[in-house]
Image (cartoon, helix red, strand yellow):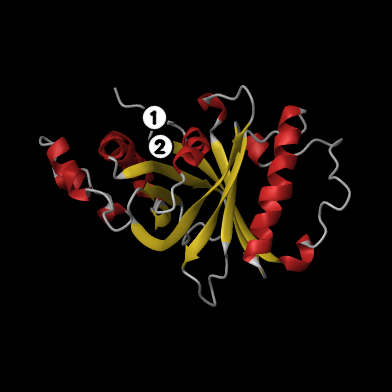
Amino acid sequence: MRKEITFLAVCILSFQFALAQSITTHQYRRVAPENMQEYLKRETTYWAKWAEKEVTKGNLTFWAILQRVGGVNQDTSPNILIINTFKDIDKGADWGSIDAMFPDVKMEDIGTADISTNMHHVFLSNLSNHIRAENSTNDDYKFVRIIYHDTKNSGQHLAFEAEKWKPMVEKAMKEGQTNMKGWGNQAIISPVTSTFTYSSYSYDIFSSLQEALSPAFSDDWTAPEGFWDGFQENYNKRNSNVYRIVVGASAPAE
């Protein structure tokens, strides 16, 4: 039986295999509303099984399909995000092997190129900053808020997240002052252009859409004194969207 592993269950484990050569890609696609049901059927029925086998082979350590919830320009902007983490980006994955996995199914009924359009492709390097709430389970990981950060000094921002934000979120989780079930971040390698100026991304995980759309911290939560020192001066802008976790696969924790 196919194992459907939710996105954060995968991401939380990713610190176990955050190797120097490990590269993650964010591939954004546009699927017309009338094709969305068929598109998700193909991803969950065929490509999820393919991804599990690629994980077993050691080509992939992580694969997931996310569906955007809401947002602007819904008639033209990407509404699917595919995340792959490659053990060796030059080797990649054995994309053509899916044909042999389903010999009785026509490739035209497996492939997704005819019902989707690739729009953006982002390369990221893995970091070891991945945390989750104590006693959380796979059932808690249903929605993710993905945030792209544009900062003047990316190193300063990543240091802030590792040294201040991460331990603060961990403390808030333990004290029940946040509805976040997990958090993590990565550095963006490419592209770097005048229109794509983001240098890192982070994700917040929630167990419901209501929580994903609500303030992440309770009313009695307060940041430590000096917590935001230097943050605003270094920060330019952000791009944030909420996604539903559809399906994923990952290598087991070592």
Q: Can residue 214 be seen in this view?
A: no
Q: Can residue 166 be seen in this view?
A: yes
Q: Distance between the residues labelled 2 and 1?
A: 6 Å
Label 1 SS = loop
Figure disc tally: 2
Residue nearest the observer in this picture, 49 or 44:
49
Earlier-in-chain disc, 2 versus 1 = 1
Residue 70 placement, left or right of 226:
left
Q: Name the residue under label 2.
A: 248
As drawn, the residue found furthest toward the right would be 225
Residue 76 placement, left or right of 229:
left
As drawn, the residue found furthest toward the bottom would be 194
Residue 152 in percent (x, y) is at 67, 70
Asked if the residues shown at circle 2 and circle 1 are in contact, with their CB atoms under 8 angstroms apart, the answer is yes
Q: Which amino acid type is marked by label 2?
A: Gly
Against 101, residue 76 (above or below) is below
Residue 193 in percent (x, y) is at 51, 75
Q: Mark 1 points at which residue?
A: 4
